[in-house]
Amino acid sequence: MAHAGLNDVAVRLGRPIIKAEEIAQVTAWLTDIEAVIAARFIRAGLILADQVALDNPSVATLIRVEAASVIRKMSNPTGLTSVTRSVDDASVTERRDDATAPGPGLLDEEWEQLLPDSTSGAFSTRPGFLTDAEAAAL
């Protein structure tokens, strides 16, 4: 079950979600995006529930990101990126990111807000040294 709920989406959307079909769709998209986030955490060697318990990310951040993803999907459910129609010369253009309607997804900035900062890596230490007095104080 997703951390964000129907009400979280409705408040950010600025309108109630009351039609049964829309409720079912939003609920499914919330479940989908939570699964996408959990899978990404697993690929990073983390468990989403454990990280949320550590407040990294916070529940509020997770809810905000999930709701934003679903609102983007609600605004563009088919994944259409551009449409061009002309009456003269019968020009029609439809361009999509993908051949099928994509599920809810996250922006790079949202992944940065969710995934904890890595403390390991090739450049994880800063060069420097401690004087004998500083080392003795430790």
Image (cartoon, grey):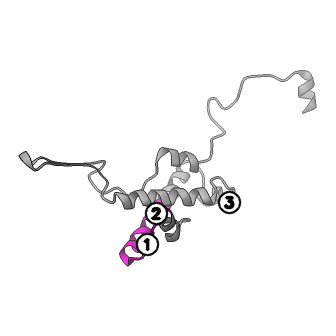
Within-10-Å neighbours for mark 2: few <14, some 14–19, many 20+: some
Query: Are circles 2 and 3 on residues that touch, CB within 8 Å?
Result: no
Which residue, given by chain and number where applicable, does mark 3 sit on?
53
Query: Are circles 2 and 1 on residues that touch, CB within 8 Å?
Result: yes
Amino acid bearing label 2: Leu
Q: Earlier in the sequence, mark 2 or mark 3?
A: 2
Quarter of image, res 75: bottom left
Residue under the image location 64 percent in, 29 percent down = 123
x and y percent of residue 13 in the render?
A: 46, 63
Is 20 left, or right, of 117 in this rendering? left
Disc ID at residue 17: 1
x and y percent of residue 83 in the render?
A: 23, 50
Q: CA distance from mark 2 to mark 1?
A: 9 Å
Q: Which of the two marks, 2 or 3, is nearer to us in this view?
A: 2
Q: CA distance from mark 2 to mark 3?
A: 27 Å
x and y percent of residue 16 in the render?
A: 45, 72
Q: Which of the two marks, 1 or 3, is nearer to us in this view?
A: 1
Q: Secondary structure at mark 1?
A: loop
Q: Nearer the viewer, residue 49 or 43?
A: 49
Residue under the image location 44 percent in, 60 percent down = 70
Within-10-Å neighbours for mark 1: few <14, some 14–19, many 20+: some
Q: Secondary structure at mark 2?
A: helix
Q: Look at the image and tell me in which quarter the C terminus lies.
A: top right
Q: Earlier in the sequence, mark 1 or mark 3?
A: 1
Is 129 left, or right, of 81 in this rendering? right
Which residue, given by chain and number where applicable, does mark 2 sit on?
13
Is 60 left, or right, of 106 in this rendering? right
Amino acid bearing label 3: Ala
Q: Which residues are magenta?
A: 12-35
Q: Secondary structure at mark 3?
A: helix
Q: CA distance from mark 1 to mark 3?
A: 30 Å
